Amino acid sequence: MTDTERLRQILRGFNQQTEDFSTHDVSNALMPLIRELRDAQQELPAQLKAEAMAFEFMENYPEKKNSWGTYHGPMMVWQDAQGQWFESPSLAAVTADDLAYWAARAGAVSHPLLAIRYADLVWDFSPKVTGRSGDIHLAQRVIDSTMALARGGTHEPVYTKEKLERALSIALAIRDADRVSAVRDVIIAYEDTVAEDGLRGLWGFSFDFLLDNSKVPLEEVTRTQSSMP
C-alpha cells in the first residue's frame, strides 16, 4: 500500500465513523505515517502535510493570546534559549494551495466534524493568507455541518456548544437571516437535550449565546422546545 493510499484509508475511516471522535484523534492517527516517512528521510507528500496541519490548529483560541486575529491558533507556542518565539503549526506556513485543498476536502467529506474543520480553516484564514474573504459557501458549510453535528448527538457536548456558538457568529457575520434563526433553534433544542444541573457549562449557554445578542431574533422562539428541529 502506498503512502497516499494509507492516508486515504485513515481519512476514509474517520469520514465513515459513527462514534465520537475529535480533531486530535485525526491528528494522532496521522502521526505514525508521518514518523515513518521522516525516519526514512522521505519528503512528506503535500496532501499529508495539509492534512496534518489541518488537524493540529486549536479552535476557539484565546483571543488575548492570539496575535493572528483568527478563530484558530497554534497548538504550541514556545521560546528558545535565544529568546526567539516559535509556533506550531504556524499561520505563516499556510499557503493558498493548502486553502484550496481544504476547500475541496470540505466539499468531499460527509462527516460533519471533518467538514467543519476544513471549511472553517479556509473561511478563517483566507483573509490572512490571500487577502480575500473565503467563499461564502464555505461559511454556509460550517454552519450547516455544525447543526448536523448537534442534531446527531454523538459529539462531546462541551465542544459541540462551542461549535454552535461559532456557527452563530458566522451566520451573523454573513447576514444569513435564515441560518441565524436555524442555529438559534438548534442551540435552544441542544441545551434542552444535554443540560444537566450538576455539569457546569452544559446549562444556561442558550442565554449567553442568544439573549445577550441583540442581533438574534427571539420574538417567535418557543422556550419549551424539547426536540431538535
Image (cartoon, rainbow, N blue to C red):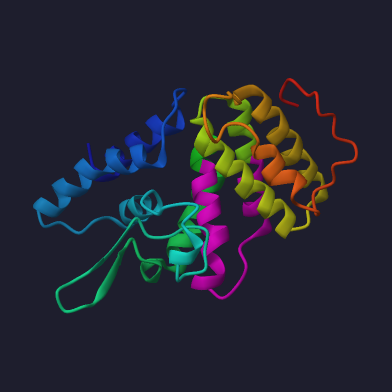
Which of the 4 image quadrants contains residue 33? top left
Please check the rendered image and state whether residue 133 is part of the magenta-colored stretch, yes or no.
Answer: yes
Q: Is residue 191 left or right of residue 116?
A: right
In the depicted structure, whether residue 206 falls above or below residue 55: above
The one of 85 and 146 positioned closer to us in this rendering: 85
Decide if residue 8 is in sight here. Answer: no
What residue span does the magenta drawing correspond to? Answer: 115-144
Residue 23, percent from left and from top: 40, 41
Which of the 4 image quadrants contains residue 6? top left
Q: How many marks?
A: 0
The one of 91 and 10 positioned closer to us in this rendering: 91
Most extreme residue toward the top is 226
Residue that appears at 90% across and 40% down = 219
Decide if residue 119 is in sight here. Answer: yes
Q: Is residue 212 left or right of residue 203?
A: right
The one of 99 and 116 positioned closer to us in this rendering: 116
Most extreme residue toward the front is 198
Residue 82, percent from left and from top: 16, 79
Q: Is residue 124 left or right of residue 218?
A: left
Please check the rendered image and state whether residue 76 is part of the magenta-colored stretch, yes or no.
Answer: no
Residue that appears at 48% across and 54% down = 102
Residue 142, percent from left and from top: 61, 47
Residue 144, percent from left and from top: 66, 41
Residue that appears at 76% across and 34% down = 185
In the depicted structure, whether residue 52 falls above or below residue 12: below
Quarter of the picture holding the N terminus: top left
Tell me which secondary structure the magenta stretch mostly adopts: helix
Residue that appears at 40% across and 52% down = 54
Quarter of the picture holding the C terminus: top right
Most extreme residue toward the right is 219
In the depicted structure, whether residue 177 falls above or below residue 23: below
